[in-house]
Image: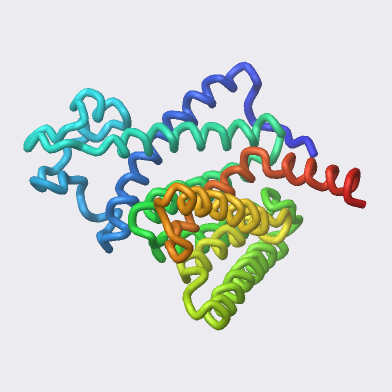
Amino acid sequence: MYYPYPFTEEIMPLWYIFIFIFGLCVGSFLNVCIWRMPRGESVVFTPSHCPNCNHKIKWYENIPVLSWLLLRGRCSKCKTSISIQYLVVEVLTGLLILLAWWRVVEWHYPISLFLFYLLATVLFIVTFFVDIKHKIIPNRLTYSVIIISLLLALFFPQATGKASSAEALINSLLGILIAGGIFTAVLILGKIILKKDALGWGDVKFISAVGACFGIYPPVWFFCILIGSMLGSIIGLIMIITSRGKWSSALPFGAFLSFAGYLWILCGTEIAAYYLMFCQTYLF
């Protein structure tokens, strides 16, 4: 369906520039989340500071990308190196949010859908970096995404393809229950059959947050589970073959789910359509 936008095509390039800069600023905040959430620190009330010398970072030292480059990746006071991850997260967030905006406007989806894509992108980026390093998915992240998703569904039902706020809210709640229920069942059965945790509760809460964002139609959470599992299996086999891991090695499954989730935003409907076409042509 075609949705008219409240701006002309002539100013669209300016919107792309604005969205990219906005994405860089979001990336700067996500760096705070990635560092503080696993440590149980506040991401709002504690001023930005150097973790080595506790130097309070001034506003002009906290400009996305530019400050890191001008400071040459070092604290202005103690000269301790600032990880290049900060630069990577800011640029990556800017690009991914820009691509999410492009997806919405080029396919003429409702503009309000961008809010869901933005929220999901935040979930995917923070989960990816935190899970890879700490092997956890912060509860504060998943709970916050679930609550905000429900509020967005309530106020922007059109973005979910529903006619009313009640339908959109029920859709999100069902997404939480079904997606979270599937992972809960896998976790419990894995514990019974394998005598160990096949999944973590963080993964259950993560997929519940995805369900809250996208509901039950389209089943983004199913796409995340399928592609994330395939990717995790491939990476696990590569690690075993190269002697960098064992069959019992724990993998950051949340990172694979995050990759799959953003892949859906970018081209998931096309992948699903091609898959169904392949099945109808060659399997049925």
Q: Is residue 176 left or right of residue 72?
A: right
The quadrant of the image that shows the N terminus is top right
Residue in the image at 51% along x and 58% along y: 148
Residue in the image at 30% along x and 48% along y: 32
Indicate whether 51 appears above or below 153.
Answer: above
Measured as percent of width and height from the top left, residue 198 is found at 52, 70
The quarter of the displayed image where residue 41 is located: bottom left
Would you say residue 253 is visible in this rendering? yes
Residue in the image at 25% along x and 38% along y: 83
Q: How is the image coloured?
A: rainbow
Indicate whether 151 appears above or below 30.
Answer: below
Q: Nearer the viewer, residue 108 or 84?
A: 84
Measured as percent of width and height from the top left, residue 227 is found at 63, 51
Q: Is residue 93 left or right of residue 133?
A: right
The quarter of the displayed image where residue 103 is located: top right
Measured as percent of width and height from the top left, residue 163 is found at 76, 56
Residue in the image at 58% along x and 48% along y: 260
